[in-house]
Image: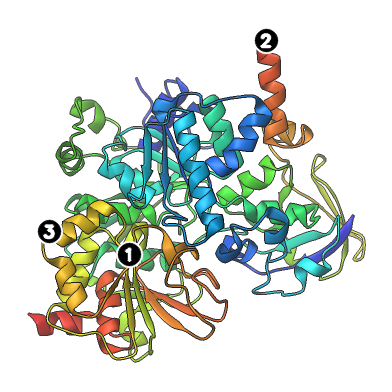
């Protein structure tokens, strides 16, 4: 459960992970996340909070630090009308649920949200309304359950190494 | 009888070992070429491969190009470059390029982009390789580390949007203008689709122009951009010592005539004017003439999309016998060292330098917000690069306009944005 932080359409990876800060360690880079449009975001956002945005969230570069920064700041999920392809994959790979919510515009800043990515359900506790969302494909849900692509792959490779069929 | 298929479906079907795939299928593909640069590659892969206890699945199918932090500007970037070199050596990656330029141009220059290949690149502009009839998509570092360890990746087979252009451009109009126009027409939100370019305009384009179309499929938000291989493709590769042996097989990757597209758009190249994208998005596009008089402090010719030899030729056409306006900085970062060498050999560099340009190293540089030529608060820049997101090229208070190399060079001479055709017609 967390509070909603609202952003508009076309939030790009340069806003999420500014180029000039890309060589900093991940925790330091995360402090610059979204600073160009919301200077207080990184300082104010708390563990469990939710980023809510419009169309094409995460467009631009392939830099995974865009999703890493949100995760390091404690963001528990991103709800958006649509996602850019590489950001979507990066988020899921890190175990950060990226959830397509066509009615994201109904959510207001600070609304308390509760999200169940596995059940495909978003509850807006402040507004007392809920949304069924498109289920995350089963092969990706398996990855999220394992904690992301790396733990998922590690499990697969160790099973393979042990000679057990997949 | 074989099911009708698009180019993208054919490449993916072959890479997945299936007779056919259709848009929406979730499949696992074997990767023919996996590449990354110094920012997204070894420095991110190393800890993940260690965690997995895995090495590089097939060093012959991996390429690494140092372009984001090269040449080093401080101790941190020097360390990143050192780690990249050491990784390539330790893992036997022979296709490692240091100080050679930007990955998306360096790889085709070395004949490594092959028609019909399934290519995974650790950079969003990987679709540039689609100009050769490959399926080439960008991936983040964790996806790439998994590919480096296993040689495979999952994907949802994209639908294809067909974009056809017919007719010849007016003088001063380029492939870059096509893409800035398409960003406005098609929008930036085309995820999980591929863009296939065709029509007589595209058929008569050089590989350099085709690379611009496919490169900026990334700006459209598409998985990739593709163009069917033809004689132009084969000649490019043959000239670089990497001929296509079975041309008939390579041609067969083209979409079937009755292939299913999710949309088909047709445009008239003869009517296209030079285009400019205003801050802070590549889809904020209007004809160059509508920005007439916007003052600039910096003009930047660089990046994978905008600093190939042909781009430097365009700038030289405008700058020949002219000087840049007082107070304007014209920075030129050729996209590869081969580009610089060719431009030095054919007299292009001499024209650019005589006009007052400053030559920068080959690399992603200011386009990626990393190298020389970054902008201050309030600076206005016109750039031949592909993105003008807020803060990308330096301070969040800077403004970046995107245009063709003609438009960038013309603005450098005038001190403000003008329709480049005004200077080209004067030049005759």
- Identify which residue, A108 or B52, lies in the foreground: B52
B276 lies above or below B4: below
Q: Position of residue B2 (x, y in %)?
A: 36, 22
- Identify which residue, B89 or A59, lies in the foreground: B89
Side (left or right) of B366 relative to A45? left
B325 lies above or below B108: below
Q: Position of residue B156 (x, y in %)?
A: 55, 37
Report in which chain the residue with disc 1 lies.
B
Q: Which circle marks residue A165 in the picture?
A: 2
**Do the residues indicated by labels 3 and 1 lie within the same chain of the protein?**
yes
Q: Which circle marks residue B345 in the picture?
A: 3
Q: Given this view, does label 1 or label 2 mark the residue nearer the observer?
A: 1
Residue at image coords 76%, 66%? A42
Q: Disc 2 versus disc 3: distance between alpha carbons?
A: 59 Å
A103 lies above or below B90: below
Residue at image coords 45%, 68%? B282
Q: Is residue B25 visible?
A: no
**Do the residues indicated by labels 1 and 2 lie within the same chain of the protein?**
no
């Amino acid at each position: 459960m967390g509070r909603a932080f609202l952003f508009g359409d076309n939030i790009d990876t340069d806003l999420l992970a500014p180029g000039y800060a890309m060589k900093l360690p991940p925790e330091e880079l995360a402090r610059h996340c979204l600073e160009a449009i919301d200077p207080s975001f990184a300082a104010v956002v708390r563990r469990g909070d939710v980023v809510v945005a419009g169309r094409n969230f995460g467009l631009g570069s392939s830099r995974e630090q865009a999703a890493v920064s949100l995760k390091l700041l404690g963001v528990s999920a991103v709800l958006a009308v649509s996602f850019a392809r590489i950001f979507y994959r990066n988020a899921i790979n890190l175990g950060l649920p990226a959830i397509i919510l066509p009615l994201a515009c109904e959510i207001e800043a600070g609304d308390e949200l509760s999200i169940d990515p596995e059940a495909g359900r978003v509850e807006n506790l402040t507004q007392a309304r809920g949304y069924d969302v498109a289920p995350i494909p089963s092969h990706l849900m398996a990855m999220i359950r394992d904690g992301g692509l790396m733990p998922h792959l590690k499990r697969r490779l160790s099973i393979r190494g042990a000679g057990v069929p997949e | 009888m074989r099911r009708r298929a698009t180019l993208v479906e054919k490449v993916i079907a072959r890479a997945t070992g299936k007779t056919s795939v259709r848009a929406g299928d979730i499949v696992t593909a074997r990767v023919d070429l996996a590449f990354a640069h110094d920012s997204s590659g070894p420095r991110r892969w190393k800890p993940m491969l260690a965690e997995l206890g895995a090495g590089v699945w097939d060093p012959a199918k991996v390429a690494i190009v140092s372009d984001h932090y090269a040449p080093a500007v401080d101790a941190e970037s020097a360390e990143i470059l050192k780690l990249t070199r050491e990784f390539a050596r330790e893992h036997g990656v022979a296709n490692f390029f240091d100080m050679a330029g930007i990955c998306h141009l360096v790889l085709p220059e070395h004949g490594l982009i092959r028609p019909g290949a399934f290519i995974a690149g650790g950079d969003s502009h990987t679709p540039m390789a689609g100009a050769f009839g490959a399926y080439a998509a960008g991936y983040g570092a964790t996806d790439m580390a998994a590919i480096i360890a296993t040689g495979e990746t999952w994907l949802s087979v994209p639908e294809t949007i067909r974009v056809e252009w017919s007719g010849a451009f007016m003088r001063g109009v380029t492939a870059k203008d096509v893409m800035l126009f398409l960003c406005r027409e098609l929008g930036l939100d085309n995820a999980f689709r591929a863009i296939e370019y065709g029509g007589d305009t595209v058929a008569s384009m050089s590989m350099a122009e085709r690379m611009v179309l496919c490169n900026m499929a990334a700006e459209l938000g598409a998985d990739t951009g593709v163009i069917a291989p033809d004689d132009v493709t084969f000649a490019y590769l043959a000239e670089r010592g990497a001929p296509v042996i079975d041309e008939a097989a390579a041609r067969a990757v083209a979409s079937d005539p009755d292939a299913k597209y999710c949309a088909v758009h047709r445009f008239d190249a003869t009517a296209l004017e030079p285009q400019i994208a205003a801050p802070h998005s590549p889809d904020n596009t209007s004809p160059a003439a509508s920005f007439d008089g916007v003052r600039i402090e910096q003009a930047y010719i660089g990046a994978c999309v905008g600093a190939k030899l042909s781009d430097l030729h365009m700038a030289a056409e405008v700058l020949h016998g002219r000087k840049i306006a007082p107070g304007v900085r014209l920075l030129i970062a050729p996209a590869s060292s081969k580009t610089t060498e060719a431009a030095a050999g054919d007299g292009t560099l001499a024209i650019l330098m005589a006009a007052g340009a400053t030559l920068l190293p080959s690399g992603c540089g200011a386009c990626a917000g990393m190298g020389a030529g970054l902008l201050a608060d309030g600076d206005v820049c016109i750039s031949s690069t592909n993105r003008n997101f807020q803060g990308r090229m330096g301070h969040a208070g800077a403004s970046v306009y995107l245009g063709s190399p003609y438009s960038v060079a013309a603005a450098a001479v005038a001190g403000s944005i003008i329709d480049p055709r005004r200077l080209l017609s004067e030049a005759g």
